[in-house]
């Protein structure tokens, strides 16, 4: 049929969630006919058409891309270059085992109780010490613990943006942020990125033209391009924000995952006036299932974020907060960061070597100095959706560039993650991908 199995399965899952099909072990999947149910029960009522009840906001959020990415990342029959997740080989499970044992030994341990919405105080202290090491001086009450930093982007949209407001993002940008701003009903305007990061000269014109409220940026090892903003542009960006009175969300999950090149200061470190709202996470340094991130910002911003967060989930998972706090205070954090940087640099180089071994004309990439991703430019004119299918048939996944651009642009790019696949799988996956490119080009 030319339709791939996972697409069909995804479609079934969606129909099932909508209540339109039902499946039973041994009987397969069947369409639930609302009409036949009505005739059988002779009732004047029928099941509601749920979609009619969905809010405008939830309609705008109607893109299953993120959910599907998670499903894809958990499949064992695929070499995944698509998810941005940590390597299982280096996950610090041993260190965590001791901490967990300590928690279960007491019948009603602190970690089993609620914490304040802003987070467990001792963790906020430990994070403010970590911020100090990242060059930012802030007090524990300027830290808010999040259930992952993506929650921080969502809360930022709720705290600062009304439908119709303008938000500036880099292009390419992080797809979740784009989906969040889209769901919020905002107008999203993109600024191009070059090898020095965000084009602040273009930004200057856009600020004048659109009067945005917020700029969302990933200055260090940007997702997906891997590019870092130069120091000069960082300074210029801040100056423009002060002049035009625009707040900046600095999303910084990757700056400690550095392989080579200079350490650049965070925008937060360079910002004496408090225009920068800094987000980071333990997802990339520890592992994503821990679901602990944080925001560092001025106290009124922390307060307002907490007002929204209390409505969402009261507070981040107490056990996770406790584990991270212990981990940070145990002295294990720095050796762990060193270890993952070594491992991920090796994996990056394996991927680069595999790409260079028998190169494909027109396939280009940016060598990342840090972070999780290799950003590739595909040969001119290649149909990216066919490439995705051809790669999936060879058991390889990647994220097409369109996920990171507005209005369907970016099809000539793909993002490859090199931290999650094993050292052995990387060359195999690249081989499959090259084959898929060749097949797609020759069709
Ligand atoms: N921001 C960026 C730039 C990311 O790449 C990610 C993870 N893919 C996040 C935020 C979200 O991280 P978390 O797991 O903490 O929600």
Image (cartoon, grey):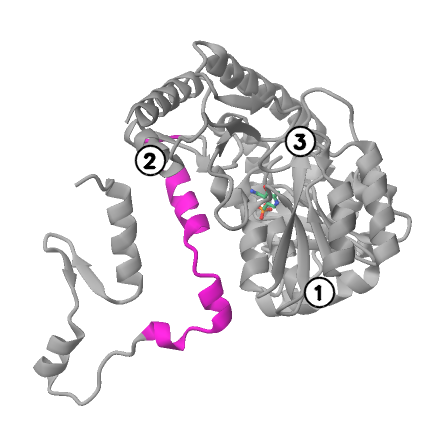
Q: Name the chief secondary structure element in magenta.
A: helix
In the image, the segment drawn in magenta is: 50-79
Q: In which quarter of the image is residue 117?
A: bottom right
Q: Where is residue 323 in the image (x, y as percent from the top left)?
A: 62, 44
Q: Quadrant of residue 380?
A: top left
The reply to whether the residue tagged 2 has its Cβ within 8 angstroms of ligand 1 is no
Question: In front: mark 1 or mark 2?
Answer: 2
Q: Mark 3 points at which residue?
A: 227
Q: For ligand 1, give the image quadrant.
A: top right
Marks 1 and 2 sit apart, C-alpha to C-alpha, by 39 Å
Magenta highlight on residue 69: yes
Q: Position of residue 188 (x, y in %)?
A: 62, 56
Q: Residue at x 66, y 37 (%)?
A: 193
Figure disc tally: 3
Q: What element carries label 1?
A: helix
Marks 2 and 3 sit apart, C-alpha to C-alpha, by 28 Å
Q: Earlier in the sequence, mark 1 or mark 3?
A: 1
Q: Which of marks 1 and 2 is nearer the N terminus?
A: 1
Q: Determine whether label 1 and label 2 are within 8 Å by CB.
A: no
Q: Mark 1 points at which residue?
A: 160
Q: Which residue lies furthest to the right in this view?
A: 272
Q: Residue at x 59, y 41 (%)?
A: 172
Q: Relative to the observer, which residue lies in front, 350 or 75?
A: 350
| Mark 2 neighbour density, 10 Å: few (under 14) some (14–19) many (20 or more) | some
Is residue 122 among the parts visible in the rendering?
no
Quadrant containing the C terminus in the rendered view = top left
Residue 225, above or below 21: above
Q: What element carries label 2?
A: helix
């Amino acid at each position: 049929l030319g339709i791939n199995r996972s697409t069909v399965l995804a479609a079934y899952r969606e129909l099932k969630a909508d209540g339109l099909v039902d499946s039973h072990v041994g009987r397969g999947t069947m369409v639930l006919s609302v009409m036949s149910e009505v005739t059988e029960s002779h009732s004047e009522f029928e099941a509601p058409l749920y979609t009619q009840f969905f809010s405008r906001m939830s309609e705008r959020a109607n893109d299953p891309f993120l959910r599907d990415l998670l499903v894809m990342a958990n499949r064992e029959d695929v070499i995944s270059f698509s998810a941005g997740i940590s390597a299982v080989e280096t996950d610090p499970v041993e260190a965590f085992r001791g901490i967990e044992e300590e928690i279960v030994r007491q019948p009603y341990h602190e970690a089993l109780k609620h914490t304040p919405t802003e987070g467990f105080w001792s963790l906020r202290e430990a994070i403010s010490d970590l911020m100090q090491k990242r060059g930012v001086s802030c007090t524990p009450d300027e830290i808010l613990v999040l259930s992952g930093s993506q929650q921080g982007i969502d809360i930022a949209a709720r705290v600062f943006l009304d439908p119709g407001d303008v938000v500036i993002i880099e292009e390419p940008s992080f797809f979740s942020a784009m989906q969040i701003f889209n769901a919020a009903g905002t107008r999203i305007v993109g600024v191009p990125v070059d090898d020095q990061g965000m084009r602040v000269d273009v930004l200057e014109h856009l600020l004048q033209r659109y009067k945005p409220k917020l700029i969302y940026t990933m200055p260090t090892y940007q997702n997906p391009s891997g590019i870092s903003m130069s120091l000069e542009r960082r300074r210029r960006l801040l100056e423009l924000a002060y002049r035009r009175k625009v707040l900046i969300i600095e999303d910084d999950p990757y700056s400690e995952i550095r392989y080579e090149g200079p350490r650049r200061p965070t925008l937060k470190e360079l910002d004496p006036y408090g225009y920068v709202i800094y987000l980071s996470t333990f997802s990339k340094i520890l592992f994503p299932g821990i679901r602990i991130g944080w925001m560092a910002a001025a106290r009124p911003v922390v307060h307002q974020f907490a007002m929204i967060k209390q409505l969402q989930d009261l507070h981040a998972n107490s056990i996770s907060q406790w584990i991270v706090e212990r981990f940070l205070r145990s002295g294990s954090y720095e050796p762990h960061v060193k270890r993952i940087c070594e491992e991920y640099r090796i994996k990056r180089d394996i991927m680069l070597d595999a790409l260079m071994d028998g190169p494909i004309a027109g396939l280009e990439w940016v060598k990342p100095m840090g972070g999780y991703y290799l950003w590739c430019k595909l040969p001119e004119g290649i149909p990216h959706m066919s490439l995705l299918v051809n790669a999936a048939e060879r058991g390889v996944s990647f994220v097409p560039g369109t996920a990171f651009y507005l209005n369907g642009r970016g099809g000539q790019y793909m993002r490859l993650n090199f931290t999650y696949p094993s050292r052995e799988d990387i060359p195999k996956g690249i081989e499959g991908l090259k084959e898929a490119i060749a097949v797609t080009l020759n069709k």
